[in-house]
Amino acid sequence: MSLIDNIIRPDVRALSAYHVQDAAGCTKLDAMENPYQLPEALRAELGRRLADVAMNRYPTPSYTALKAAICDKLGVPDGYDVVLGNGSDELISMLSVACARPGARVLAPVPTFVMYAMSAQFAGLEFVGVDLKPDFSLDRDAMLAAIAEHKPVITYLAYPNNPTGSLFDEAAIVDILRAVGDSGLVVVDEAYQPFAPTSFMPRLAEFDNLVVMRTVSKLGLAGIRLGYLSASAALLNEIEKVRPPYNINVLTQAAAEFVLAHSEVLDEQAALLRAERSRVRDLLAAMPGVEVFPSAANFVLLRINRPGLDATQVHARLLEQKVLVKNVGKMHALLHNCLRVTVSTPEENKLFLDALQTALAP
Ligand SMILES: *Cc1c(COP(=O)(O)O)cnc(C)c1O
């Protein structure tokens, strides 16, 4: 037995490290980043603010000002507070840790965001996936049956879902919230809320077991790593206990407070991306050999439908042309031959569409 075999958990040893494609020199359309930066004048002012941050001090542990800005600018209902995470990835792991009672299970429709299952595994929880329907809508009856069978402590619903872009039926989610009742949390993950028409945030008061989770990542601040969730005060109080102290660093805190004071800039960028999304979808829909799915997020999912050509080949041909998209074709049977592409600026979208045209040429 080697040192590694003696100390590292077998399920961790069996994992392969998360592979992130090197994007140097590429048009990067694989990670749902907002392509826009802040206007020059705001960036200069942000620089001055950051220069004044006391990096020799720990953050103020309560994050009162940052939380107030989030509640005020990002639609948290009156009377509700938030718990902050170093990205919503950290919030997911805090939820897993807080709920990891022996034998407990976590449920989510699949395919979905992979961190739900990963984080459950790391915390020693069993993950149960329920297939979406082939059109990527929620299989309400299968979800309700799985809830009855497994009594999950956490049910995750990405709203809209990644990597499909689909927005699950609101009434089906309400049925799930009621079916779970007081035996589990239902976490509605609204990472793509800036691009979606509806939200569960205004409905927090209706459901004691509802947690609404969001992030500023897709809004244009992926680099600062800041997520937040809201729920009843009683739940937040428990989740807060497993939050690592000082998990939001002083630079993130200062940058977020500054940008939220100018949140109209982010709103305008999101509006541009929503308009580009429908333009890109229309152009893709008109391409022979391409099937494009509806999206309520800042990406589109498409399927390569051409005999003799698969998503892996198209992905490679795009990469040869320095366009990086995400090949999700092997992630789940329902995603057969699918690629996920971030919606970007009109210029970058044109680069992608032209490269796809070339990649599809016989
Ligand atoms: C991108 C994404 C996140 C992760 O957000 P971070 O705040 O950057 O950690 C969470 N949920 C879903 C569904 C996502 O697609």
Image (spheres, grey):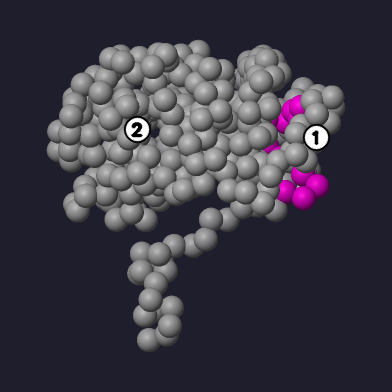
The amino acid pointed to by label 2 is Leu
Q: Position of residue 269 (x, y in %)?
A: 70, 20
For marks 1 and 2, give the CA distance. 34 Å
| Left-right relation of 253 to 109 | right
163 to 9, vertically: above or below = above
Quick check: is 148 in the magenta stretch?
no
Q: Quadrant of residue 220?
A: top right
Q: Position of residue 235 (x, y in %)?
A: 30, 32
Q: Total number of numbered labels?
A: 2
- Magenta segment, which residues? 23-38
The overriding secondary structure of the stretch rendered in magenta is: loop
Query: Which residue sits at x=77%, y=22%?
Result: 346
Crowding around mark 1 (Cα neighbors within 10 Å: few <14, some 14 to 19, many 20+) is few
Q: Quadrant of the N terminus?
A: bottom left
Secondary structure of the residue carrying tag 1 is: helix
Q: Residue 134, can we see it?
A: no
- Can you identify the residue that label 2 sits on? 236
| Left-right relation of 48 to 336 | right
Of circles 1 and 2, which is in front? 1
Within 8 Å of ligand 1, the CB of disc 2? no
- Can you identify the residue that label 1 sits on? 48
Query: Which residue sits at x=63%, y=28%?
Result: 257
Q: Quadrant of the C terminus?
A: top right
Q: Return the residue nearer the eye: 340 or 92.
A: 92
Looking at marks 1 and 2 on the same chain, the residue that comes earlier in the sequence is marked by 1
Q: Position of residue 226 (x, y in %)?
A: 56, 37
